[in-house]
Amino acid sequence: MKRILFMLCGLIIVSLAAPAYSDSGIPLSVLEELQAEGELVRYFYGDLDLEYLPFGPLSEELIADLQDQEATIGVEALFTIDLPQGLAEDPERDLKLYNLMNRVSTLKGIEYYSASRERMRTLFAEAHRVDEVGSKKPLNDLSFDQIPRFQEQVLFQEDLTFGKNYVTTGFTYQEGRFMMQVRNETTMWYYFLPLVKSERFRMNMLIIPDGDTLYFYGASSVDSASLFGIEKSKKDSFYNRIKAMYSWFSDLIEEEYS
């Protein structure tokens, strides 16, 4: 009897210590903070350290991708998007969201707020799909009648901070969740300095619809040389990319369905 009571007490202690999660897989404590702040962002250096990552499908795949390199700078951010009622209740909601996600040409001209310049600044002067790295011919955006489990595209981007680059973008769908993964295929330059070598920049975005709310989680890790004097600007640049991608997707939803 004493042993049974001891085991029950142990289970109670474990259950009290375990974090409580919402249906979206976000710890309730994080969700409360998100609702109070509007967005959450944090940086990490060296080891991968993710505190805001929602638990559930595709989370392990996101971690595995970011762990594939030794990150010198990392950032994660969590946002919400209000889904229009018509879209939230649409039986084809996921397909419509997936096709919006594939409108990669609309990345051209997206902006972010530059704290150093105290104004909005364009992120990509050009963005479009191409056949392969090195190709210059723009291809039309893809559209789907059914959501594939996984598909990958090569994009050309003219980045006003890091120059002209080719990136591979993967799209994964699983159990009502979407993941968009970006990996640089060419060196990213900061003026005349080769800042990030090929395949050493990763940006992963996990998109989770939950009723009339969509949770947008982004995490980026960068294996970059330590360059004296521009560490802060580099750090902010990678957060700006996540924030700009969130704003891009939020704006697409609003323009199409509000």
Image: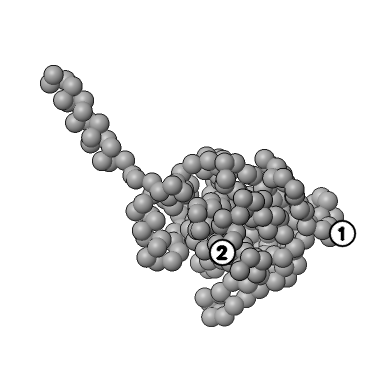
Question: SS of the residue at dot 1?
Answer: loop
Residue 117, quarter of the rendered image: bottom right
Q: Residue at x 23, y 35 (%)?
A: 12
Identify the residue at the far left of this view: 2
The answer to the question of whether label 2 and label 1 lie on touching residues, with beta carbons closer than 8 A, is no
Would residue 165 be seen by someone viewing this image from the given angle? no
Identify the residue at the far bottom of this view: 118
According to the picture, the residue beneath numbered tag 2 turns out to be 84
Classify residue 80 as left or right of residue 96. Answer: left
Q: Residue at x 83, y 57 (%)?
A: 139
Question: SS of the residue at dot 2?
Answer: loop
Q: Of circles 2 and 1, which is in front? A: 2
Q: Amino acid at mark 2?
A: Pro
123 w.r.t. 7: above or below: below
Classify residue 26 as left or right of residue 228. Answer: left
Say which label, 2 or 1, has the lower sequence index.
2
**Which residue is more in the foreground, 174 or 191?**
174
**Which residue is more in the foreground, 13 or 85?**
85
Q: Amino acid at mark 1?
A: Lys
Image coordinates of residue 86 in percent, x first then y, are 59, 61
Q: Quadrant of the N terminus?
A: top left
Image coordinates of residue 81 in percent, x first then y, are 52, 62
How many numbered discs sit on the rendered protein? 2
Image coordinates of residue 27 in percent, x first then y, are 38, 49
For marks 2 and 1, give the CA distance: 36 Å
Q: Quadrant of the C terminus?
A: bottom right
Q: Residue at x 77, y 61 (%)?
A: 128
Q: Which mark, by number, is residue 128?
A: none
According to the picture, the residue beneath numbered tag 1 turns out to be 137
Classify residue 153 as left or right of residue 258. Answer: right
Residue 146, quarter of the rendered image: top right
Residue 242, quarter of the rendered image: bottom right
